[in-house]
Amino acid sequence: MTDRTYPDDTAGPFPRPPDTVTDGDGREIRIRESGQDDFEALAEMYENFDPADRAQGIPPVDPDAIREWLDTIVSPEAVTVVAEHDGRPVGHAILVPDSGEGYELAIFILDEYQGAGIGTELLEHLLGQGQATGIERVWLTVERWNEPAIALYKKIGFETSSSESFELEMSISL
Amino acid sequence: MKVLLGTGGREDGFDALDRTLERTREAGDDLTVAVLETSSDEDVESVAADVREQVAATGIDAEVRVLEGHPGSQLVELAETEGFERIVLGGGQRSPLGKIDLGEVAEFVLLNADVSVTLVR
């Protein structure tokens, strides 16, 4: 955990929110920074999250546990970006500071909005916002069998930094 | 039941110890605690001292042993050679985002133990 490695070369530049994109199914998706005002709408999005898409215990399933978890990750130091369709959150991506110089990344897309390119857009805009905030080191963990997710992270510029654990660890320099 | 708890001094290990001591009292289990040399920064002897203190506070008669060397294999070998019926481990650390991070000890033990393994959450 302490000796995390990052790529020598920086990735990007990435687009910054706010932005509006059209997804692969022709839906108009609004991407913007999220804040405390979005708390309840995001909690409801996570209540509708497909349990099969959970990763390493998050998001929690219980409504109260979801709110407790959201509370701990939405700090002033965190960078969070939301994707909305018809004014309703359908995706959420987060950068949370670790105890060192890095930020941990996670992204969640509602089942019916997956496979339409929203994940790529949301990730790029999150990293764009992170870049603008001065964040230089980002990492994530992903289950080794989750090939679609790993392919997406690679496409964005993430490189495998550790494969010795249950989960694959990937990192990117901004 | 003969229960073997392995801990390396991280928070989830002490949580597991707490819950296992409770369970030991309820079930009348025969508990042994093995303090492991993990990659964490904690000194194994000082972890063992903390573990002994936590055990003593409950009044439960559990043996506390320090296992040197590769933590996963030492724990599995001890379980096999001394006839333990269950291995108990901490349920993993949480990342800054709240993701469960299972360490290499848990992975080794899950894949190599020939007795049931409990991860405490």
Image: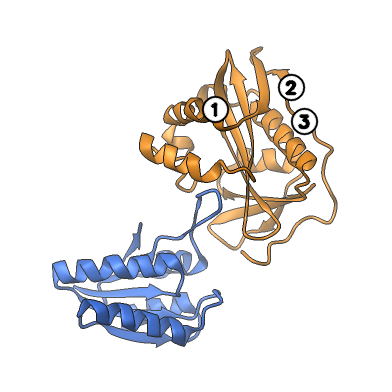
Q: Are circles 2 and 3 on residues that touch, CB within 8 Å?
A: yes
In which chain is the residue bearing label 2? Answer: A
Residue A92 in the figure: left or right of residue B84:
right
Q: Are marks 2 and 3 on the same chain?
A: yes
Chain letter, blue: B
Chain A colour is orange
Q: Position of residue A109 (x, y in %)?
A: 56, 30
Q: Nearer the viewer, residue A15 or B86?
A: A15
Q: Does residue B82 show up?
A: no
Q: Which residue is mark 3?
A: A16
Q: Which residue is mark 1?
A: A38
Q: Are marks 2 and 1 on the same chain?
A: yes
Quadrant where the N terminus of chain A is found in the figure: bottom right
Q: Nearer the viewer, residue B79 or B95?
A: B95
In which chain is the residue bearing label 3? Answer: A
Crowding near pointer 1: few (<14 within 10 Å), some, many (20+)?
few
Secondary structure under tag 2 reads strand
Q: Nearer the viewer, residue A142 or A138?
A: A138
Kind of residue sitting beneath label 1: Asp
Q: Earlier in the sequence, mark 2 or mark 1?
A: 2
The Cα–Cα distance between marks 2 and 3, rounded to whole angstroms, is 7 Å
Q: Residue at x 49, y 36 (%)?
A: A53
Residue A11 in the figure: left or right of residue A168:
right
Q: Residue at x 80, y 47 (%)?
A: A174
Residue A19's disc number:
2
Kind of residue sitting beneath label 3: Arg
Q: Position of residue B27 (x, y in %)?
A: 15, 68
Q: Position of residue A68 (x, y in %)?
A: 43, 42
Q: Does residue A64 show up?
A: yes
Q: Are circles 2 and 1 on residues that touch, CB within 8 Å?
A: no
